[in-house]
Image: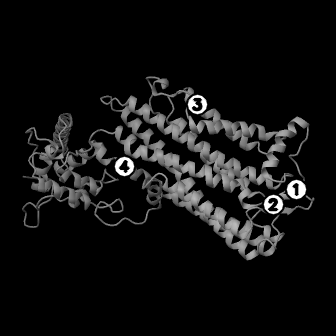
Amino acid sequence: MFRNGKLFVPPPNDGSDFKELFKRLAAAGAGRPPGEDGFPAGPWTPELLAEAISQIDSNPVGVDLRTVQLWFQENEKGVSTANIRWLARIFGCDDPVATSEWQMELSAAQSRLSAKRREWKRAGSDAAAAVPDVPRTALIADDLVHSAEPSRDTDANGRKRPFSLARKSEALFSHGSPLNLPASVFAGMTALGFLSYIIGIHNVTYERADGLVKQVGFLWAANWTLDFMVFLPLFFFFVIELLVFWKSDGRKNLAAPGDQVDSDDAWMRNVDSSSYTYWSVFLICLLFAGLFQWVGVSLIPLMKGGGNYAMDWGKIALVRPEVISVQATVVFTGLAYLYMCLVFYLFFAGLILLYTIVHDLWKIGDGLKKRPDVDHQHELSEAGLIVMRGVFRCAVLGILVAIWMKVQSSYLASSGENIVAWLVGDMSSIFHGRNDVSTGFRYRMPTHYSSLLVAISACFVFLYGSIRLGVGSRFHAPLWKMSAVVALLVVSYLLIDAFAGFSILLAATVLLALYGLIDPGLGRWRASELGNDQSVS
């Protein structure tokens, strides 16, 4: 029987589960238009069905080929609520009444499959018992089909996806060992440190015009040693930890049994939606923070002099040519700036991923609130706590990175002989009535601006998470404590070198922030403390 020019098979209402029902419909080619001879065109294949679903006008995101292949295979995977709707459109031949009937039949079949799956798990049966009518050879063949499934780099039609910076960036954080990315960043800075030692600028001083002998060695630069060897590797580690939790446990625990099949695909669609942001950040980091800044701050002053920048390891060849040549300095600074811009791209990519996780959790929670038949309050509370704990840690580390960038930049214009003596001297000055803040030297300080961007970006992600994952119209104690720590860090950042004794406030705030990394809740933090009425707003 044909309806709307397609083969229509009425719902059997025979108590079949989804796998049994879908197998018969796919074999019959239900919902396919007839062939040129007017007879049924044949059975569905995963590729044809995925293409048909993706062509439905009201389904702009389509369906992934891997998901459709799972429906065809002998396994315990079901179908999500969203895809039941699209299958009902296909099998109902775009007839409203038939589509409604098929939606009820498919939903009932999925419920029966879920009930069977619970029984199998309760009985402790293995994969072979889960499909008792399938011989062992079929199970082996099914494993081969799984291994032959298209990778995440193929689209719904099996074609290779175009290059996606968003997906590649996400893969750097989510694939392999959690230590890979932090260790790579640490190793890169270690290599630069060894290279600076070899060429002789690891520990070098110069005499300023006022007679002050100032330490400007590469290994004395806090914005390089502390940031790239401590804070940024820790930042990447915590981003990876949170991302792995969200993809493997958090997101799937909040999904219905059938929705778990599509969890990875839905996450990757969220990542793809920020593709423009990844490219914008990449170009800004590579061109402006990397190339243009290197040319303006290092290359041109080395070649032509001038620039009114504070003397540092990157320009020491101008006043200490016996230590290092201009040519060697150009090469070393080029490598250092290339490393720096790539690492900071990864830093901002990590912030984008944190934003995506928060936004994803908020959307899922908002959807669950519209389903009164589903109670996921406890899971939402637990997921919200874990996500905010990770976001807080990363925000703290991001602001610490900005703090030491500004501290180093301020030190270069100060009257301190080295950065440690400068900070210690500032602490003691408040007791001796000295004011060593103003030295009379005024330089261009591009690092002040770039550090401000880093601090603002880290604060934005934390603020967004606090608003989206807050508890209605009020924050409870944990969020208040975390917000207070972040606010203190921002105040300390803004007041660097603003008054005598600023380093006392800075030291106290940094110690509090480091404690927050160990105990993000700043005390006992359980889901019960957020109240029984927590929801994702």
- Position of 363 relative to 163 (above/below): above
Q: Are marks 2 and 1 in contact (CB under 8 Å)?
A: yes
Write down the residue under mark 3. Answer: 522
Mark 4 → mark 3, Cα distance in angstroms: 34 Å
N-terminal of the pair, mark 3 or mark 1, is: 1
Secondary structure category for the residue under label 4: helix
Mark 4 → mark 1, Cα distance in angstroms: 55 Å
Q: Residue furthest right?
A: 210
User: Type of residue at label 4?
Assistant: Ala
User: Type of residue at label 3?
Assistant: Leu
Mark 2 → mark 1, Cα distance in angstroms: 9 Å
Question: For the residues carrying marks 4 and 3, which lies nearer the camera in this image?
Answer: 3
Residue 162: which quarter of the image? bottom left
Write down the residue under mark 4. Answer: 266
Write down the residue under mark 2. Answer: 310
Write down the residue under mark 1. Answer: 441
Image position of 242 (left or right of 63): right
N-terminal of the pair, mark 2 or mark 1, is: 2
User: Type of residue at label 1?
Assistant: Phe
Secondary structure category for the residue under label 1: loop
